[in-house]
Image (cartoon, rainbow, N blue to C red):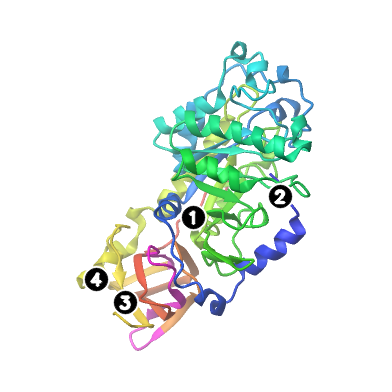
């Protein structure tokens, strides 16, 4: 899943992610669509890599693999979905065709697919199995269809290939139910010109609510943007509105990283690369906890199942996530009665929100526990339907005489977790030092982190 023109894209995305508050203010009137709000509320998804690479012990296929090498003996998509749900994921994206061009669905556009493999006598459909399994577990479903195709001869003829890609897209968008996301990977595409407007028109015809993921360098009007690397971290202030070539758009960031270090596909004897629960938690806190979306890569083995170690790690991570940030751990749920407006940010309900006084550009939201409480982090969620308004804030505690800051930054966005040295206080507040428009806060939560398992 390496990306197109990394040097150029990296520079462009660095400018986007590290943009100043002044430039962000110019985007105050840009608002998300209802579909984008829905997608951001999902927060955490998985992406499944499975194909000929799985059987050839490699990450990058060149399009020459014999379809007969793809022959799993016990595909269990339900297991993938259960493990994903246990980890806390809310949606699953299936890689229907990676860069090698081998399709995991019985496309009518090419023989280079599962219909030419011995698996299920050529009658199998991995996309169907994944879609059905995801929905059975309450997960939303998305599709990754690589634009770069190293097998298809028409790739060298852009117009002919555009027709080919659209035809495969039509198969996928019409026959697998509602899609929450369509992944357009830019890897290998340097120098190739795609007719992206026609791709998006095709997608929107059948799947008007699907969010389009794409590198900033591919085209300017995607719904979701890449973070710029695959280590799982958002760096710098995270503003949702991005300006590319004068085209300003609400385009939240998705952070993709695999469950195994540097490995998107399964490899034999690879348990040593499996990320620890502590590492996964750190990744979640620096992606979802910085206002982005986490897309975690999982990979079935040659049987078609996730390895037992991967399943156990996903389950352990989900358990740790619930223990650290679940409603039962939210100290702010136990507070001295407050006014109705304040209660809306402390009630654990993301559908209610506190709003700063009309016309104010500076306001405070306070939690009074009624007695001293020890904590080391806060979780703040901005109500974004009307745009991203907070431009500077501080987390402050009261020592009995005065308020003292323990953390602060510029952007809040969908979610912002602030971690600081453990402090004991009876009162804590979110001090919005600057906002463009009236700031609104869906949730202000307080936690004392529990220790994590060593693995």
Tag 3, which secondary structure? loop
Residue 3: image tag:
2
Callout 2: 10 Å neighbours few (<14), some, many (20+)?
Answer: many
* Pair 3/1: label in front: 3
Mark 3 vs mark 1, CA separation in Å = 35 Å
Instruction: Indicate the position of residue 411 as horizontal and vertical percent values.
Output: 49, 71
Q: 37 left or right of 308?
A: left
What residue span does the magenta drawing correspond to?
Answer: 376-403
Residue 268 visible: no
Q: 101 left or right of 179?
A: right
Tag 2, which secondary structure? loop
The numbered mark, 3 or 2, whose residue comes first in the sequence reads 2
Instruction: Indicate the position of residue 158 as horizontal and vertical percent values.
Output: 73, 40
- Secondary structure character of the magenta stretch overall: strand
Instruction: Indicate the position of residue 85 as horizontal and vertical percent values.
Output: 44, 38
Residue 392: image tag:
none
* Contact check, label 3 and label 1, Cβ < 8 Å: no
302 up-or-down from 14: above or below: above
* Contact check, label 2 and label 1, Cβ < 8 Å: no
Residue 451: image tag:
1
Tag 4, which secondary structure? helix
Mark 2 vs mark 4, CA separation in Å = 45 Å
The residue located at (78%, 49%) in the rendering is: 191
Residue underneath mark 3: 356
The numbered mark, 1 or 4, whose residue comes first in the sequence reads 4
Mark 2 vs mark 1, CA separation in Å = 36 Å
Residue underneath mark 4: 341
The residue located at (68%, 56%) in the rendering is: 217
Mark 3 vs mark 2, CA separation in Å = 42 Å
């Amino acid at each position: 899943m390496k990306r197109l023109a990394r040097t150029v894209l990296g520079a462009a995305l660095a400018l986007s992610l590290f943009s100043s508050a002044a430039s962000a203010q110019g985007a105050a009137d840009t608002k998300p669509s209802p579909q984008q709000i829905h997608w951001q509320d999902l927060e955490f998804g998985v992406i499944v890599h499975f194909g000929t690479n799985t059987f050839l012990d490699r990450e990058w296929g060149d399009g020459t693999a014999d379809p007969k090498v793809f022959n799993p003996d016990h595909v269990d998509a339900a297991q993938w979905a259960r493990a994903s749900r246990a980890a806390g994921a809310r949606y699953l994206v299936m890689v229907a065709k990676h860069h090698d061009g081998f399709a995991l669905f019985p496309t009518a556009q090419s023989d280079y697919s599962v219909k030419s493999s011995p698996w299920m006598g050529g009658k199998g459909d991995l996309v169907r199995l994944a879609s059905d399994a995801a929905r059975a577990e309450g997960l939303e479903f998305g599709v990754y269809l690589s634009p770069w195709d190293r097998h298809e001869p028409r790739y060298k003829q852009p117009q002919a290939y555009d027709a080919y890609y659209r035809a495969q897209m039509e198969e996928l968008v019409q026959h697998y139910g509602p899609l929450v996301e369509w992944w357009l990977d830019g890897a290998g595409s340097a120098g190739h010109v795609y007719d992206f407007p026609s791709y998006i028109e095709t997608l929107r015809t059948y799947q008007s609510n699907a969010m389009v993921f794409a590198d900033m360098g591919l085209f300017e009007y995607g719904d979701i943007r890449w973070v710029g690397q695959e280590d799982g971290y958002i760096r710098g202030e995270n503003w949702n509105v991005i300006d590319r070539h004068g085209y300003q758009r609400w385009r939240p960031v998705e952070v993709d990283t695999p469950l195994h270090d540097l490995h998107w596909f399964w490899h034999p004897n690879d348990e040593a690369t499996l990320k620890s629960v502590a590492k996964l938690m750190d990744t979640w806190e620096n992606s979802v906890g910085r206002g982005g979306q986490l897309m975690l890569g999982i990979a079935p083995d040659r049987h078609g199942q996730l390895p037992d170690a991967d399943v156990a790690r996903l389950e352990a991570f989900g358990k740790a996530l619930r223990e650290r940030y679940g409603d039962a751990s939210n100290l702010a749920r136990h507070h001295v009665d407050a006014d109705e407006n304040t209660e809306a940010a402390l009630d654990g309900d993301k559908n209610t929100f506190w709003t700063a006084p009309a016309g104010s550009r500076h306001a405070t939201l306070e939690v009074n526990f009624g007695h001293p409480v020890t904590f080391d982090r806060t979780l703040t969620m901005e109500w974004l339907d009307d745009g991203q308004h907070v431009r500077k804030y501080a987390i402050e505690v009261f020592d009995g005489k005065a308020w003292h800051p323990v953390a602060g930054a510029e952007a809040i966005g969908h979610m912002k977790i602030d971690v600081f040295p453990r402090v004991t206080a009876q009162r804590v507040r979110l001090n919005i030092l600057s906002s463009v428009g009236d700031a609104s806060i869906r949730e202000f939560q307080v936690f004392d982190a529990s220790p994590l398992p060593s693995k």
